[in-house]
Image: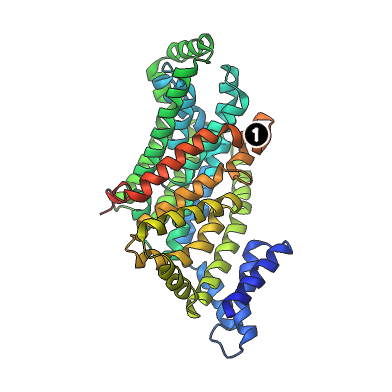
Amino acid sequence: MTAIWILIAFLAALVLSVPLGVAMGIAGLIPSFIDPGVAGTIQFVARSTFGAVNSTVILAIPLFILSGAIMTHGGLAKRLFDIFALAVGKIPGGMPCAVIITCLFYGAISGSGAATSAAVGAMCIPILTELGYDKEYSGSVVAAAGGLGIIIPPSVPFIMYSLVTSVSVPKLFIAGIIPGVLIALIMVIYTIIRFKTKKDENKEMIDKMNRELKQRGVLRVLKDGFWAIMTPVIILGGIYSGIVTPTEAACISVVYAIIICVFVYKTVNFRKLIEIFMTSVKTFAPIGILLAFAMALMKVLTMLNIPADIGNFVASAFDNKILFLLLLNLVLLALGMVIDVGPAILIIVPIILPVALSFGIDPVHLGVLTTVNLAIGLVSPPFGMTLFVTAPLVQSTPVSIGKKAFPYIICLLFAIALITYIPPLSLMLVS
C-alpha cells in the first residue's frame, strides 16, 4: 500500500509541474507521513540526499559536461568531419556517412546525445544542405547518430547507471564500444544502400567539396584534426590502462580541452571560457539535484523492499528470459520516448535490476541495454531530445525530423535486437 501512495504522490507532483527531482524528494517523504515509526524519516531522507552527491564518481559528470562544452565551442566537430569526409566522401552517401562517423567520434568527447547533435549539427547540417541534401533528411541523420553520444564512452548515462547500481564505470565504458560501433556501422550500411539505390545526390557539388579538401592536402586535414582525434585516445586510454580513474580522466579532459581550444586552435578566448564555465554549471545544477533526490528515493524504496517485491512479481509473471528481455526493451523504448535519459535511468534501473539479476543477466549488459534503448528514445517522437535539438537547425518541426529519421530508427531497433540477444557484443571486451 505504501508503494501505491508513493506512486500517487510522485505522479501528482509531476501533474502539478513540480520539477522531477523535487517530485522524487516528495515521494521519498511519503512513508514517514504514513507511518511515523518507519525508519525512512525526514532526517534519513535528508542525510541520503546530501550523501548521494558526496561521491567522487559523481564529479565526473559536471567535468565531462564542461570539457564537452569547451570542445563544442572550439569547433572540433568540423575538424573531425573534414577527416571523415576526405576518407569516405566519394562513396554513395559518403557525406551523410561522414556525419555518422563524426557523431561516433564526437560522442567520445561529449558523453551526451544532445551535445553531440548540437555540435555536429551546427557544423555539418549547413554543409549537407549546401551539397544538395534535403534539409530535413540532414537533420534526421544528425538526430539519429547523435544518440551515439550516450553509448560511446565517456558516457554520462553510464556514470549515472553506475551510481545507481555500483557497477564499475570503466567496465560500462568499455562495454559500450562495440555496441556503439555496431550501431554506427548499421547506419552507414543503410545510408550507402539508400543512396546507391536512389542515386539522388548532387555529385557535382560533392566532387567539388572533395577537390577542395584534397587541395588543402591530406596531411593538412589530418594535422588540423589530430588533436580532436587524440581526445578519446587520451581520456579512454588513461582509464583503461589504469593510470587514472574516470573522475581523474574527466579532470584531464577539461585541462586538455582548455589547452587545445584556447592555446592550440585558438577558437575559444578567456572571456568565452568563463561563459562556458557558467553555462556548464547551470546545465549540471538540475542534474545534480535530480541525482540527489533520486538516490534518496531509491534508498527509501530499498529499505521498504519495494524493488524486490516488484521484481518477484515480474519474475513470477514472466518465467522466460527471452520474453522478459523483449518486455524490458519495450518498456525502455516507451520510457525513452517521453522521459530524458538521466531521469529514466534513475527511475527504472532500481526496479529492473533485481529482476534482471534473477534471470542471470549481467548488470554490465543490462547497463548497455538500458542506455541503447534510451538512445533510441532520443530520436523517437514525440519528445525525442535530439529531434528538438536539430529541428531549429533546419527550421523544421521535431515531428517532421522524426518521420525522416524513421529508417534510422529501424536500424537502431535491429541493432538493439542483436545487442539484447547476443550478450558478448557488450561483454567481450569486459574482463
Q: Quadrant of the C terminus?
A: bottom left
Query: In the image, what residue occupies the spot 56% across and 22% down?
Result: 128
Name the secondary structure under disc 1: helix
Q: Mark 1: which amino acid?
A: Ser
Instruction: Determine whether, in the image, residue 298 is placed left or right of residue 240.
Output: right
Asked if residue 267 can be seen in this view, the reply is: no
Instruction: Determine whether, in the image, residue 361 is placed left or right of residue 196.
Output: left
Q: How is the image coloured?
A: rainbow
Query: In the image, what residue occupies the spot 60% across and 22% down?
Result: 134
Q: How many numbered circles are shown?
A: 1
Residue 263 vertical placement versus 169 (above, below): above
Query: In the image, what residue occupies the spot 50% across and 11% down?
Result: 203
Residue 51 vertical placement versus 271 (above, below): below
Instruction: Determine whether, in the image, residue 15 is placed left or right of residue 238.
Output: right
Q: Nearer the viewer, residue 202 or 316?
A: 316
Query: In the image, what residue occupies the spot 55% across and 67% down?
Result: 294
Q: Residue furthest left?
A: 431
Residue 239, position in %: x, y? 34, 50
Residue 112 vertical placement versus 143 (above, below): below
The residue wearing badge 1 is 400
Q: Quadrant of residue 276?
A: top right
Residue 100, position in %: x, y? 46, 31
Q: Residue furthest bottom?
A: 37
Asked if residue 344 can be seen in this view, the reply is: yes
Q: Quadrant of the N terminus?
A: bottom right
Q: Quadrant of residue 192?
A: top left
Q: Quadrant of residue 403?
A: top right
Residue 396, position in %: x, y? 68, 32
Residue 342, position in %: x, y? 54, 56
Label 1: how many Cα within 10 Å (few below 14, some 14–19, many 20+): some
Q: Nearer the viewer, residue 61 or 346?
A: 346
